Amino acid sequence: MTPALIRPALITCDWGTSSLRAYLMAADGQVLATSASGQGIMALGGATFPEVLAAIAGDWARDHGPLPVLLSGMVGSRQGWVEAPYARCPAGLPDLSAALAEVPAQPGFGRIAIVPGVLKDDDTAPDVIRGEEVEVLGALARLGVADGLFVLPGTHSKWVRVEAGRIATFATYMTGEVFAALKGHTILGRMMEEGAFSAEGFRRGVEAAAELEGPGALLGRLFSLRALGLTGRLAGADSADMLSGLLIGAELRDASAGEPFTLVANPALAARYAEAATILGLPHARAPEGCGPAGQHAVAKAAGFI
């Protein structure tokens, strides 16, 4: 590898609602340094967006010159720095790289732009993603594929179908947020005890999901967790993970319909979804780590940043 390829050439930021992660990259996409902050777009702590960028990446710019900066995630939302209008499905690398939202010039930095999210413009059930589209592009690059069904678990789990390198359609499952709401704000949470992960509780939840049949079946099964606890058949230490398994299992059964899928997630979350898929007998694989930075690099290269 020549020195030119490992010289810092780009700064990227995955800027979400509650967190920010910055990457210093070489022209070939190699990550040379990382920096993390809790200053997501809804947690700036009184600072401005330019001030937060300078705090997390200003040293890199001072040390290596006015590097270009590519931002992705909720920083491009209506509540973010500059709103980046959604690209419409189907959308691939050429579409996203051509629709970047430019950010006003900032001292010490080169060009700054934000990757747009993607809109599925359905008349009755529209859907949006912002940030996950970059991870999907990174997964395509890391895996060397152009088609597939990709799952990005989280507060709002995204199921993204890619055809010929373009996001053809996607669906959102509010699995993580529903779990948090049920645990923190309903009668189910009153019997839950905090503790280490309960593999037994999770397995029971996934197996319960496998028994669900018909519309509304999940709603009809949720209260059984309380009844199991009241009758001594579910320990408080197992209850939260049984709920997690039930919700994740229901999501997997509905969204995958038995089709192979690839998980794009941090190791802990990917392991939980993979375990549920294994229990349900669903074919799946895991994308390598680093899909986010890989996707940002792909967009930056296509947009002429490097």
Image (tube, rainbow, N blue to C red):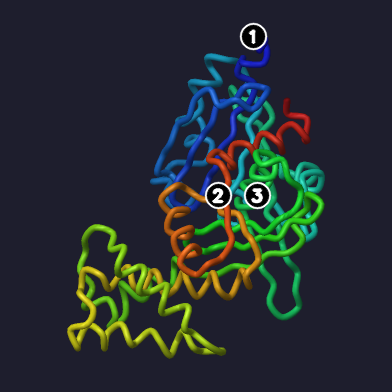
Rendered location of residue 81, percent (x, y): 59, 46
Q: Is residue 101 above or below residue 283?
A: above
Q: Is residue 80 visible?
A: no
Report crowding for label 3: few under 14, some 14 to 19, many 20 or more residues within 10 A (C-alpha).
many
Q: Which residue is mark 3?
A: 136
Q: Which residue is mark 2?
A: 286
The residue at the far front in this view is: 281
Q: Which residue is mark 1?
A: 3
Specify which label sits upstream in the sequence, 1 or 3. Answer: 1
Look at the numbered discs 1 and 3 and tell me whether their residues touch, using CB distance below 8 Å.
no
Report crowding for label 2: few under 14, some 14 to 19, many 20 or more residues within 10 A (C-alpha).
some
Q: Is residue 277 left or right of residue 114?
A: left
Kind of residue indicated by mark 3: Val
Specify which label sits upstream in the sequence, 2 or 1. Answer: 1
Which of discs 2 and 1 lies nearer the camera? The answer is 2
Kind of residue indicated by mark 1: Pro
- Structural distance between the alpha carbons of marks 2 and 1: 33 Å
